[in-house]
Amino acid sequence: MKRKTLLKITLLLGIILIGSCQHDPVFTEVTDPNMTDPDITDENGRICDSDTIYFSNQVFPILMGSCATTGCHDSNTARAGVNLTSYENIFETGRIEPFDLNRSNLYRVITETDLSFVMPPGNPLPQDQIDIIGKWIEQGALNNSCDN
């Protein structure tokens, strides 16, 4: 009887000890010799590609600061039916055509050469910001981000 009780207690303690073991996951650093800076990673250890345009990091701040403002393309005003306050709205109401600048209305209006039609009105985006938006569309207009 004592032996069965001792065996049950030992078994129970063993189960408790095994169940309480925790191991940190093993991460292998990902390196790509084609990357210009392999040390740029997000919080999940993924490499942020310096050639990729990230919507949340690069495109959205431009649109929020220059276009989705009060009286223009914010959610309350949405001039000409264009609301640029979220990825979904930008994609839908800005009529983005992934991989195709010529068929993307948003890109056409920010590159308009007639100052009476260019967006934002009277204050065109700087060329570097236009290039970011253009490259993002050419890369497929993804809803992506990278947190360094």
Image (cartoon, rainbow, N blue to C red):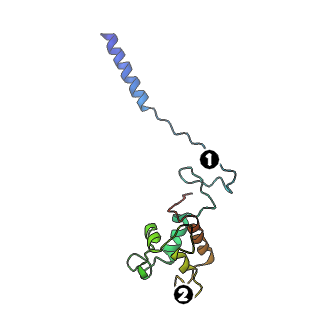
Which residue is depicted at the point 50% across and 71% down?
96
Q: Secondary structure at mark 2?
A: loop
Where in the figure is residue 102, as x and y percent of width and height? Answer: 57, 75
Q: Amino acid at mark 1?
A: Val
How many angstroms separate mark 1 from mark 2 (CA)? 46 Å
Q: Is residue 122 above or below residue 61?
A: below
Q: Point out the tag, 1 or 2, that comes first from the N-terminus.
A: 1
Give left or right: position of 131 versus 13.
right
Where in the figure is residue 126, as x and y percent of width and height? Answer: 60, 78
Between residue 132 and residue 12, name the one nearer to us.
Answer: 132
Q: Which mark is residue 30?
A: 1
- Determine whether label 1 and label 2 are within 8 Å by CB: no
Which residue is depicted at the point 53% across and 50% down?
44
Q: Which mark is residue 122?
A: 2
Where in the figure is residue 112, as x and y percent of width and height? Answer: 57, 83
Q: Secondary structure at mark 1?
A: loop
Q: Residues within 10 Å of mark 1 (few under 14, many from 20)?
A: few
Q: Amino acid at mark 2?
A: Gly
